[in-house]
Image (cartoon, rainbow, N blue to C red):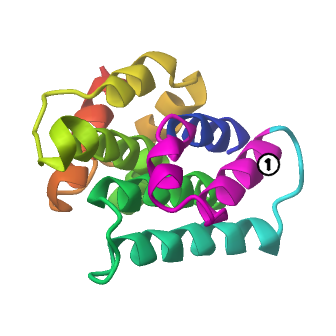
Amino acid sequence: MREIAGFAARCASRVLSIFEQSLPADTRPRDAIDAAHAFAAGERRTGALRQSAWAAYRAAGDAAAPERVAEPAAADAARAASHAAAAAYLHPRASPHQVKHILGAPAHAARAEELQSKGGVQERRGSSDTLEWARLHAPPAVGAVLGRLPAAPAGGGRVGELIRELDAALRE
């Protein structure tokens, strides 16, 4: 779990600046990534870690709120941070939903990149830089855990597509 949380935190870190450019005073996504890094480095899994994941999730909602002028990419960058902290809470139940927990951070980071490209126009690229980076830098623990789970579930929009793309690549 620690290796997976560290991997997820590194993926989310790649796009943290997207959120911070839009909402520079909001530290919730950075706090979640820092908490995930700390867990990966050996700190205990505590309620504060879980709370940081939920706080980053709420930051994503705030970034996506209609009254905000933040670009949509900021919300996915915050979701990546939320998934990074939540990766410490994987459970042994072999369900497709667990794949989303493992690969949510890189998928949301990749989506943030897509949304940011070309001035926020929703561009669909076959693979973003972050998705490719995640494929190349996933530690063996990611592949080992994915190998015990069913394939990523259908649905989930563009982020779901990115999760399935990365899941398939890591299982090869």
- Which residue, as the protein is rendered here, is positioned at the far bottom? 67
| Element marked by disc 1 | helix
Q: Overall secondary structure of the magenta stretch? A: helix
Q: Position of residue 170 (x, y in %)?
A: 36, 26
Residue at image point 21% right, 27% down: 127
Q: How many marks?
A: 1
Please tell me how crowded label 1 is: few (under 14), some (14-19), or many (20+) other residues with Cα within 10 Å: many
Q: Which residue is mark 1?
A: 39
Image quadrant holding the N terminus, namely top right
Q: Position of residue 138 (x, y in %)?
A: 51, 25
Picture quadrant of residue 91: bottom right
Q: Look at the picture and state if 22 lies above or below 148.
A: below
* Residue farthest along the top direction in this orientation: 136
Answer whether residue 31 is magenta in the image. yes
* Residue at x-position 83% and y-position 67%: 46
In the rendered structure, the answer to whether residue 43 lies left or right of residue 148 reads right
- Give the residues drawn in magenta, as a range: 12-40
